[in-house]
Image (tube, rainbow, N blue to C red):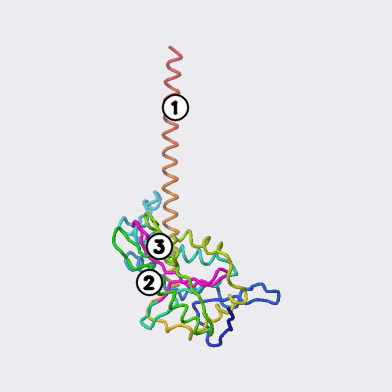
Amino acid sequence: MHIEATGGTPADHCGARKPTANGKAQRSVLPALSVSDQNFPLVRMFLGHYGTGRSRSIVSRFFGRSPLSSESRRMYRAAAGELGIDDALKQLGPDWSVCSSVPIARDGGNVDHLAIGPAGVFAISVRNHVGDALWVGEGVVLVEGEPVPHIRDAESSAVRCAQLLSDAVGDRVDVIPCLVVVGPRSVTVTRPPRRVAILTPRELKPWLKYLPATLSTAQIFQLSNAAQVSTTWHSRSEGFGNPALALSVFRQLQSDVNQSRRIRLAWMTGVLLMVWMITMAGVGGIASGLLLR
């Protein structure tokens, strides 16, 4: 496949690496992943419903009460899973370029992530299924027994990405659809889909990293360069608020949740240790009493 880089205005949602004279990739001026242009819909949905969590007194903080209410935990796990995907893509390394919230349709439809690297071009669709049981056949996904069009939607997003990238570079570009499901209780795959990879956030990074290489460094850069150009894609929808601020607020909430969990664990460990010491002291006293008789 021969691809020529295109001109135009760089889009802020993506970054690329430029090959040097020795053929190795170096980081370009643009970042690999522009946080401010990611929508983080699950994160902002959580914050819209529950804010920064329930208020806690000094005493409740001392004993490790969680800022999460029982009804907010499911949505919190979904939002945390969304950030887990973002973190995994950031860790792919300098051979990869990642774009997020890529506008591929005039009606405002986006593909959640577009990853370009040695293994090819991947359109990554993210679906929230915290606590759900998924069953996957060759072309069917059932969620708690109900069919959902996830495979069709992932394939459609990949086809649209391929069309737009192909038009931009003047050559055929193959885009592989990938479906990442967040937080399922179980995933049963009887017959894997022929084209769509179905993964959890934890599986995404190793799966992408260990696929066989199909693109050269020059091709990766040229495709990434085309993906940067704003005219490659449709115009973005406005009015999403400030995703970077939402991300910062949610990261702080995650820190508070983790800290409260550690405090509860410390208290539990301390109580168990005290019970053990009292029990051993009691056993020792009984044994001493028996020996003195």
Q: Label 3 sits on what residue type? A: Val
95 vs 164, left or right, is: right
Q: Nearer the viewer, residue 82 or 145?
A: 145
Where 152 sits versus 276, above or below?
below
Outermost residue to the bottom: 8
- Residue 97 position by quadrant: bottom right
Q: Earlier in the sequence, mark 1 or mark 3?
A: 3
Residues shaded magenta? 110-137
Q: Earlier in the sequence, mark 1 or mark 2?
A: 2
Q: Which residue in the structure is indicated by mark 2?
A: 153
Q: Is label 2 in a helix, a strand or a loop? A: helix
* Mark sitting on residue 271: none
Q: Label 1 sits on what residue type? A: Ala
Q: Which residue in the structure is indicated by mark 1?
A: 281
Q: Nearer the viewer, residue 107 or 3?
A: 3
Q: Main secondary structure of the magenta part?
A: strand
72 vs 16, left or right, is: left
